[in-house]
Amino acid sequence: MSKEIEIVKYQSLLGEIKSAIQQARLRASLAVNTEMILLYWQTGRMIAERQQQEGWSAKVIPRLTADLKQAFPDLKGFSERNLGYMLRFALEYPEIPILQQAVAKIPWGHHILLMEKVKDKIVRHWYMQQTIEKSWSRDWLLNAIKMDSYAYAQKQIKSHNFNKTLPEIDADYANEVFKDAYNLGFLGITEKVKEAELEKRLVEKIKL
């Protein structure tokens, strides 16, 4: 076998392994993201239920933040502001089956953006589906909302076959899910870590 053929075959093997690693890493990241979204929804629901049952005001949130920080000093994402978003999240999506759909598949930062920018639930769900199908990063999602891509898509459907309004950016979306600040905080990662170590910690959180 010539040296050139060996190089070609080796590069093919290397490419296949790299692809497998990237796919496994993304699957682990998405699984962690789903668990985190579910936890945030459960937290928001528990706060909402207690507020209704006990008549507690919003003042309970700062106390929860302080006590959770003391109990889990490495756990990020439970600031007063984010607890407020969790409460809102649970109120806006009261049924757990919806979390098994598009809601659980996008990063928390996307949810915050959608809750702030898109009030109509039907329109919001459309943006969720587009985020998944087209792998929109948070910036691309924001651009799509500013461009009113939903309204444009409806016009396109009525006139002719729908064309994509924004390009696919799989790499950006995968990177955003993998390194999302909320996901890292959920894993207790506060310092800068190498990707290999980050991948290891992600995989350790997945129950096989």
Image (cartoon, rainbow, N blue to C red):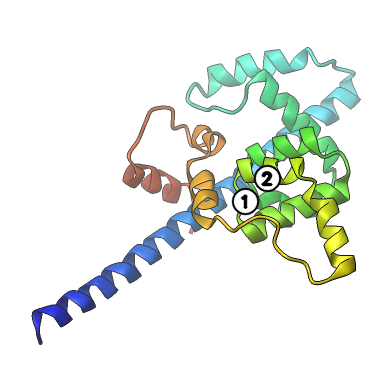
Label 1 Cα neighbours within 10 Å, binned few <14 / some 14-19 / many ≥20: many
- Give the class, few, some or many, for how many residues have Cα within 10 Å of label 2's Cα (few <14, many ≥20): many
At a point 65% along the width and 48% down the height, the residue shown is 106
Q: Which residue is mark 1?
A: 136
Q: Is residue 163 left or right of residue 17?
A: right
Q: Is residue 99 visible?
A: no
For disc 2, the marked residue is 141
- Specify the quadrant that holds the N terminus: bottom left
Q: Are marks 1 and 2 in contact (CB under 8 Å)?
A: yes
Depicted 55 relative to depicted 87: above or below: above
Taking the spot 79% from the left edge, 35% from the top edge, the residue there is 117
Q: Quadrant of residue 153?
A: bottom right
Between residues 28 and 166, which one lies in front from this camera angle?
166
The secondary element bearing badge 1 is classed as: loop
The answer to which of 149 and 95 lies nearer the viewer is 149
Q: Position of residue 146 (x, y in %)?
A: 75, 40
